[in-house]
Amino acid sequence: MPRFIACHTVEGITREALEQVSAASQQDPDVRGIASWSNLREGVLHCVFDAPSREALAAWFDKMKVPYDRVTHVEVEGQAGDLRVV
């Protein structure tokens, strides 16, 4: 399944709200949350999702009432210097 990075700016987001969205991303049949990095004080979140398409992920964000700044399709993934095409 295609992988995406979503960037969000959400002023005033709480850990509880983030936990709710994270849990919902594990229950959806099409969208799956993989990882996230957040600074709640600044309201900045970067999240990795698997989804059938950019449009499907954007529709899921709209359904969940989660604003997003950008959704980017991941072509190459790397960790600790090891790169691979996804």
Image: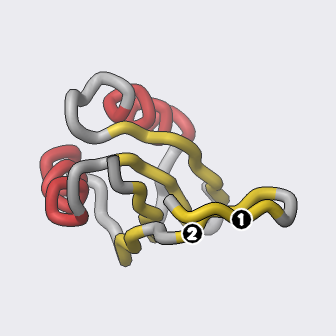
Residue drawn 21% across and 59% down? 53
Residue drawn 29% across and 55% down? 66
**Residue at disc 2, secondary structure:** strand
Please report whichever mark, 2 or 1, sits nearer to the chain's N-terminal start.
2
Residue drawn 21% across and 45% down? 64
**At which x and y percent is residue 25?**
35, 34
Residue drawn 57% across and 69% down? 76
**At which x and y percent is residue 36?**
58, 49
Tell me: 30 left or right of 25: left
Residue that extends furthest to the front in the rendered view of this protein: 85
Are the residues at dot 2 and dot 1 in contact (C-beta closer than 8 Å)? yes
**At which x and y percent is residue 58?**
21, 61
Asked whether the viewer can see residue 10, the reply is no
Q: Residues within 10 Å of mark 2 (few under 14, many from 20)?
A: few
The mark tally for this picture is: 2
Tell me: 85 left or right of 7: right
Q: Amino acid at mark 1?
A: Leu
- Kindly indicate the quadrant of the structure image that contains residue 23: top left
Towards the viewer: 39 or 37: 37
**At which x and y percent is residue 79?**
77, 57
Q: Mark 1 = which residue? A: 83
Numbered badge on residue 66: none
**Residue at disc 1, secondary structure:** strand
Asked whether the viewer can see residue 16, the reply is yes
Q: Amino acid at mark 2?
A: Val
Towards the viewer: 14 or 53: 53
**Distance CA(mark 2)–CA(mark 1):** 7 Å
Is 18 rendered above or below residue 62? above
Q: Mark 2 = which residue? A: 76
